[in-house]
Image (spheres, grey):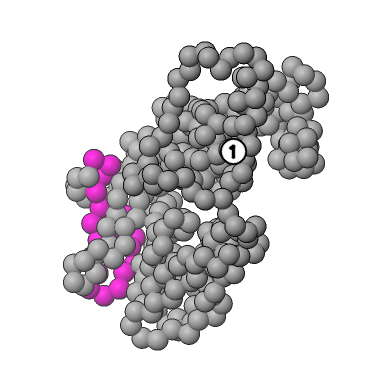
Amino acid sequence: TNGLKYARFGSTGSGPTEAERVNYLLPWDNPWRAIVGGAFWIGRGYINPGQDTSYLQKFNIDGDTYGTYWHQYMGNVYAPSIEAARVYSMYQQQGLLESAYVFRIPVMTRMSKNPAPYPTDDKSRNNWLKSITVEEGALSPAFHPETYEYTVLLEGGIDRLNIQATAYHAQCTVRNTGNIQLTSGENEIVIEAVSESGHKRSYTLKATPGEAVFAKNGYVIRGEYFSNAWPTNGEHQARKILEALDMPAGYTAKVFDTKGKEPAPDALLGTGSKIEILNDEVESFKTMYLVIYGDINGDGKISSSDYVLMAQHILGKNAQSGAPMMALDVNGNGAVNSADYVALANYILGKNK
């Protein structure tokens, strides 16, 4: 049912987007459009990122594009068994069982010699969290379901923390969220996600009131990214970035270019340059990465090279991640699409500065 809805209405449910019409030939209202457009869809979404077998579509063990064990199609534990039986039957009917085949079999570290038993009940084991947010500060690093420890960066004077967490599965119970009273010093809050079957997963937040780093002079800090360093005004200069950091007393900062070297004060930095905050004991307190919107290759300039990288990313040929991924979102709406492509082109052509 969901597939038929997508074929007609796209991801919005009310009609295909322009990108879906161009990239996937939606709506799929005739056999040719369905076959060719569907091939583009599965090619870009699965085959090009490396999920090019039925096994890898269901068990994504390569986390480079989507993250390990994410972006898995039809993850029901019974699906592989049922589909394998169907494929076997089809090959048998066609007389192909004796043909030669090449099998790609992933072998995991510490893989059990015994097959996993079938579940004895129908209760979900899904205890993954989809998101954790805090109203009064920011998580560092940015939330990821497979990251279990976070620092909460707080402004001075805050004595309560409002934590919200969302689970992927509706029957997963989330504990220890809401309005949490803080005390002086380090506060440790352990969020528990308990699956319908009773399996528990824990995420730990550490918050110390009064410790936080802020940006001034028009720059912006969002989680682990430092942005608004516009090249047109030379605001990506190392000295200006250091001067824009508002830190607790005794804290210091260093910047490193994309090659890991400390630049001269007047050096111009590019996307991916690192900003390291050290506390009064000269220990790492926070690491941030510079994001210059439009500077995808990290050379500190916005040029046709970045335009090519954006086109490749949108087409699924050269996916970006981290700071370069953030730099792709030129219009700042949280998504990378043709609108960013047009905005970057207009900037390079001098139509929009």
Which residue does the image show at 48% across and 71% down from the upper left? 191
Q: Which residue is mark 1?
A: 81
Whether 34 is among the magenta residues is no
Q: Position of residue 297 (x, y in %)?
A: 37, 34
Whether 257 is among the magenta residues is yes
Which residue does the image show at 51% across and 40% down from the upper left? 59
| In this view, 314 is above or below 155 | above
| In this view, 160 is above or below 80 | below
Quadrant (top left/top right/bottom left/bottom right) for the N terminus: top right
Residue 269 falls left or right of residue 222: left
* Magenta segment boundaries in residue numbering: 239-259
Residue 99 falls left or right of residue 225: right
Which of 4/105 is in front?
A: 105
Which residue does the image show at 43% across and 38% down from the upper left? 62
Q: Position of residue 282 (x, y in %)?
A: 18, 67
Q: Amino acid at mark 1?
A: Ser
Residue 348: in sight, yes or no? no
Q: Quadrant of residue 74?
A: top right
Using a 10 Å C-alpha cutoff, classify the residue at mark 1 as few (fewer than 14 neighbours), some (14 to 19) or many (20 or more). Answer: few
Which of 218/187 is in front?
A: 187
Residue 95: in sight, yes or no? yes
Which residue does the image show at 47% across and 45% down from the upper left? 115
Residue 335 falls left or right of residue 34: left
Which of 193/346 is in front?
A: 193
Total marks placed: 1
Which of 214/49 is in front?
A: 49
Q: Secondary structure at mark 1?
A: helix
Q: Position of residue 177 (x, y in %)?
A: 54, 75
Residue 32 falls left or right of residue 347: right
